[in-house]
Amino acid sequence: MIFSRRIDSPSVPMNSLRFKQPSRLPSFGDSGIENEQVLTLVFESISWDIHTICAVASVSRRFCAIARRVLWRLLCVHRAPGMAAALSGSDPSGRIDGGWQALAKLMFFCGGGESTRSPGHFASESRFSKTSGRFFLPKNCRGDLLYMSDPCEHHAVGGGGDEHLGVFRGVFREFMRSKTRQCLVRRQAELEEKVRCPYCGGRVWSMKAARLVPKSAARRLGSRDGGMEFFVCVNGHLHGTCWLIPLSSDEEERGFDGEDDDSDDF
């Protein structure tokens, strides 16, 4: 089964998900707006707008704590109930690797491509699929559960308009127990020194350096051979880039007809 979601959000600068240091405000107990149930009702009424959650979490340490404890989880459950349930088990209030705040950022935020000076931004549309995730798993790791986004196209700076960079992201379920992690450990793959996860800040492995990039991944994204690189962090967040092959008009019209019929738009 494939879970996908359209997430409409205006483009804003990359640092919009980096909170300002909350100030210390006097506590008024659990009454009024600081009550978690009240906040939940407020955000339900505005369809869990992520920009508003970011703003509220920056107001004070108490609001920041409430966002970490409650709001980010409920945002993910509201926007992607199937995906949230699959990643956290049968109880969506359970913990997930890297935390709910990192998952919320991964759902809404495209990290861009640093090597091509393509800036990160809020994604106007996002769709995550378990079917796509299987294309990124080596054959002996196909038992892992990986949700992958469709690539976000960026015009390469200085490319004369002919080069298109695809930026993609994904997330594993229970990465610490995954066969993918076992393969990385067994191959004694080293963690990268200069690259960090854009979603949780954790250290990452280069799947290209570990020789764990299956050819099916390039075919899935429509990327040329050798034009793909992606990383997986210690918490199971995946991010990467690829150079996209321009499609003919017939290919664009044909797309992926007959596939993903069980998609779940949210």
Image: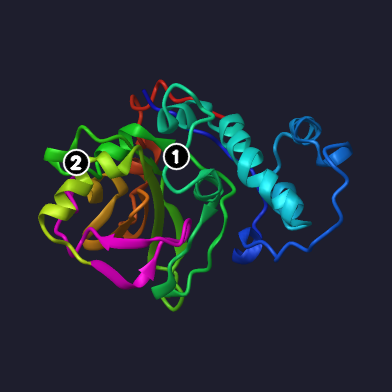
- Residue 201 as seen in the image, left or right of residue 242: right
Q: Position of residue 183 (x, y in %)?
A: 15, 49
Q: In the image, what residue type sits under mark 2?
A: Lys
- Residue 259 as seen in the image, left or right of residue 47: left
Q: Position of residue 136 (x, y in %)?
A: 25, 45
* Quadrant occupied by the C terminus: top right
Q: Nearer the viewer, residue 236 or 27?
A: 27
Disc marking residue 133: none
Q: In the image, what residue type sits under mark 1?
A: Ile
Q: CA distance from mark 2 to mark 1?
A: 18 Å
> Quick check: can you spot residue 13?
no
Give, as a single range, the part of the protein colored magenta: 191-216
Residue at image x 39%, y 35%? 129
- Compared with residue 203, is residue 51 higher up or lower down, i.e. above or below? above
Residue at image x 39%, y 46%? 170
Residue at image x 13%, y 61%? 188
- Compared with residue 97, is residue 208 higher up or lower down, i.e. above or below? below
Q: Which residue is mark 1?
A: 96
- Residue 94 as seen in the image, left or right of residue 219: right
Q: Nearer the viewer, residue 243 or 25?
A: 25
Disc marking residue 179: 2
Q: Nearer the viewer, residue 186 or 49?
A: 186
**Dot 2 or dot 1, earlier in sequence:** 1
Q: Secondary structure at mark 1?
A: loop
Q: Secondary structure at mark 2?
A: helix
Q: Position of residue 78 (x, y in %)?
A: 61, 30
> Quick check: can you spot residue 266?
yes
Disc 1 packing (10 Å; few <14; some 14–19; many ≥20):
many
Residue depth check, mark 2 versus mark 1: number of the one nearer the observer = 1
Q: Nearer the viewer, residue 41 or 22?
A: 22
